[in-house]
Amino acid sequence: MNKWVRAHTNIALIKYWGKENEDLIIPKNNSLSLTLDAFYTDTSVTFDDALTEDELILDGDKQDARTLSKVQRVLDEVRTLAGLESKARIESINHVPTAAGLASSASGLAALAGAASQAAGLDLSDQELSKLARIGSGSASRSIFGGFAEWIKGHDHDSSYAVPVDDAQWDIGMLFIIVNDAKKDVSSRDGMKRTVETSPFYDGWLNSLDADLSAMKQAVSYRDIEQVGQIAERNALKMHATTLGASPPFTYWTAESMKAMDAVRELRKLGYTAYFTMDAGPNVKIICRQSDLSALKQELSKTFEDKQLIAAKPGPGLHLLN
Ligand SMILES: O=C(O)C[C@@](O)(CF)CCOP(=O)(O)OP(=O)(O)O
């Protein structure tokens, strides 16, 4: 009976936005994230000689080949490491509020790395698990760890993996404002590729990252939530600015996103520590004190529906469920 593995999603405070190597998923820069408790994926894998192809059952529905390509990369690497030929059945359940429209590739590919290696009888270190998750999806490399994690960019497969930075057992939280816009987003993979290849703002973004990252690591070590928030918000704004210069230009921001960003600025005027970050979608994530989560939710419910507001606290790293 193969075991179920749980991995939680993470939100980058210093963004990964561009690859040095598309095939190995080696990034242009180091990134730093916070793993959260609210969103996670449970996955179980069975290698079975009777199967003629790999199959993924996600939330009860069999997935098509396109979704499978990220998964296939991880399974193939596990087969190589374990000397296996057989195909695998993957069962995966995403505990992400359906209305959220939140990409769960980070938790999904991290949970897959844990479940597939376990099913193949491999006993991988956290570093090996992080490398395995990375070839599925870059940000998944960070979900192996709880709390704050830094993805060291490296230069090849063996040198590009995440490391734990801080257990985040202090007064930090995140409040999601889910903006349900129908707009079809450019995937993070496609978005960063187009930006790296065509945006004149990309180099400016990249050149500012070393300073952002060292300032962020210092702020985390001092548990300085104001600094963590300020640095994260500025980093996110710079990242999103690069997309406007791409060819063709694009943005993940919608009118609802802007409304949410304005609401965060209003919270600051009320004296709260509240800063936003955004990823490859319209949702806005507020970095705040965990002790303010309910007060902020109450304040924001004057502008947004309750179901749009999801509170999250720091979450654990990859772990077995049974
Ligand atoms: O999470 C961050 O650092 C920032 C982003 O979320 C901003 F959108 C990018 C995540 O990219 P991912 O989905 O990991 O891409 P892949 O490696 O092409 O699969």
Image: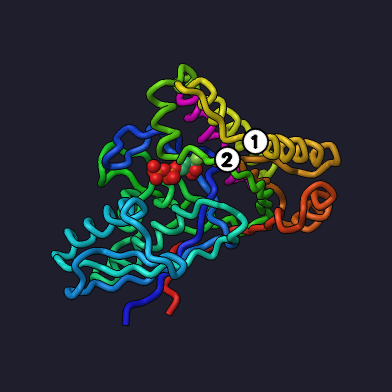
Q: Tell whether position 214 is magenta.
A: yes
The answer to whether residue 215 is above or below residue 134 is: above
Query: Which amino acid lies under the numbered mark 1 shown in the image of this protein?
Result: Thr
Residue shown at 45% from the left, 26% from the top: 206
- Disc 1 to disc 2: CB gap under 8 Å: yes
Give the number of the disc on residue 216: none
Q: Position of residue 304 (x, y in %)?
A: 77, 49
Quadrant position of the C terminus in the picture? bottom left
Judged from this view, the residue extending furthest toward the top is: 200
Residue shown at 60% from the left, 30% from the top: 237
Q: Report ligand 1 position as a quadrant.
A: top left
Residue 22 seen from this side = yes
Q: Which sits earlier in the primary sequence, circle 1 or circle 2? A: 2
Q: Nearer the viewer, residue 104 or 314?
A: 104
Give the number of the disc on residue 254: 1
Residue 239 falls left or right of residue 305? left
Q: Bin the neighbour count of mark 2 within 10 Å (Cα to Cα): few under 14, some 14-19, many 20 and up.
A: few
Residue under pointer 2: 183
Task: Assign the magenta stretch its main secondary structure.
Answer: helix
Residue shown at 28% from the left, 36% from the top: 155
Q: CA distance from mark 1 to mark 2?
A: 9 Å
In the figure, residue 6 lies in which quadrant? bottom left
Query: Which amino acid lies under the numbered mark 2 shown in the image of this protein?
Result: Lys
Q: Nearer the viewer, residue 302 or 297?
A: 302
Q: Position of residue 33 (x, y in %)?
A: 52, 47
In the figure, residue 265 lies in which quadrant? top right
Q: Position of residue 138 (x, y in %)?
A: 39, 45
Q: Which residues are magenta?
A: 205-223
Q: Tell whether position 211 is magenta.
A: yes
